[in-house]
Amino acid sequence: MTPSPEEYCVLVVEDDPHTQELLQFNLSETGYQVFSANNALEALEILQDEHVDVIISDVMMPGMNGFEFRDKITHDASLRDIAFLFLTAKSMAEDQIRGIESGADEYITKPFDIDVLLARISAVVARREHLAKVASVDPLTQLLNRQAVQRAIGRELNRIQRYPAVASFIFLDIDNFKQLNDHYGHATGDLVLQNLAEIMRRDSRNVDIVGRFGGEEFVLFFPQTAIAEAQFVMERMLDHFRQVRIEDIEEALTFSAGIVEAPRDGTHFEQLCARADAAMYYAKNHGKAQIVKWRPEIEMREHNSPTA
């Protein structure tokens, strides 16, 4: 599927006013949000404050040239995954080779056709989106994997710190999953995981973040959702999970979950995860099949390991 330009932001780094104006006008007309910088140093300042999906950079610029700018980008973990295109009059083979070897997505020489350039940008974005999706999805459940869910929640928590809001974070673990695997086999265990994943997808909103944290553990994040409302949603998911019927499994399927609220219970992923995990283990140790809100007296995971 071709990406919609309205969803993406492009940074144009170009010291020639005519070329910069041409790019900004056509990219904006296509639907992209556009930032412009006259040189690499201005671009780096913009990148400190703004989320950018694509960088289009000249090579010959005053101060830091385009190759040096690209090198700066690749050595910054927060910027290196941004799609990068060189757009330059430097057409010598050695320059093109240097641009390609830098990891840039495209090396386009001037003069250029604007329609071809727009098509190349769209192709780069689509390719990046596909690769990002493949790298971020857990193959069994088709939910976000651990790394992707942590990144997504981290972005939401950063937003909460800038623009005060409330959100709920849930850590969930399927009850008795080891025994299910041992007794019925891993193929049946996989069906249990897939059924729970489908329930979480169905009972959550598009803005919610749902991911598999590892094994039978899952993490959910509900933006703009107070803890009482989030607990209601989780109780509904638990009820729907109890109703799942898988051949040969006689007992009802359940999970235990811990729930915390941001920013009240924390503003960083690690802290919220640890507290929700502690509340989940409290639920495990006190009957299972329940959702427990974290409270200060539940300081850490209880070391008397419960039956999983």
Image: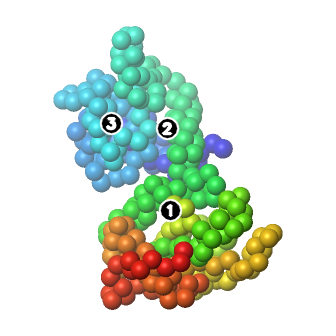
Q: Pinpoint residue 23: horizontal percent, then vertical percent.
A: 43, 35
Residue at which label 3 appears: 74
Checking the image for residue 26, the label placed there is 2
Q: Amino acid at mark 1?
A: Phe
- The numbered mark, 3 or 2, whose residue comes first in the sequence reads 2
Report the Cα–Cα distance between label 2 and label 1: 42 Å
Q: What's the distance in space between the residues labelled 3 and 1, CA to CA?
A: 28 Å
The residue lying toward the viewer, choosing from 278 and 19, is 278
In the structure shown, which secondary structural element does the residue marked by tag 2 occupy?
A: helix
The residue carrying pointer 3 sits among few (fewer than 14), some (14 to 19) or many (20 or more) residues within 10 Å by Cα, namely some
Q: Secondary structure under badge 3?
A: helix
Whichever of callouts 2 and 1 sits on the residue coming sooner in the sequence is: 2
Toward the viewer: 66 or 166? 166
Horizontal relation, residue 261 to residue 246: left or right: left
What kind of element bears circle 1? Answer: strand
Kindly identify the amino acid type of the residue bearing the numbered disc 3.
Thr
Q: Residue at x 41, y 84 (%)?
A: 294
- What residue do we see at 72% from left, 80% from top? 251
Q: Are marks 3 and 1 in contact (CB under 8 Å)?
A: no
Residue 164 in the image, given as x and y percentages of width and height: 35, 75
The residue under the point 69% across, 68% down is 183
Whether tag 3 and tag 2 are in contact, CB under 8 A, the answer is no
Residue 61 visible in rendering? no
The residue that mark 1 highlights is 213
Cα gap from disc 3 to disc 2, whole angstroms: 27 Å
Q: Determine crowd level at label 2: few under 14, some 14-19, many 20+ residues with C-alpha closer than 10 A.
A: some
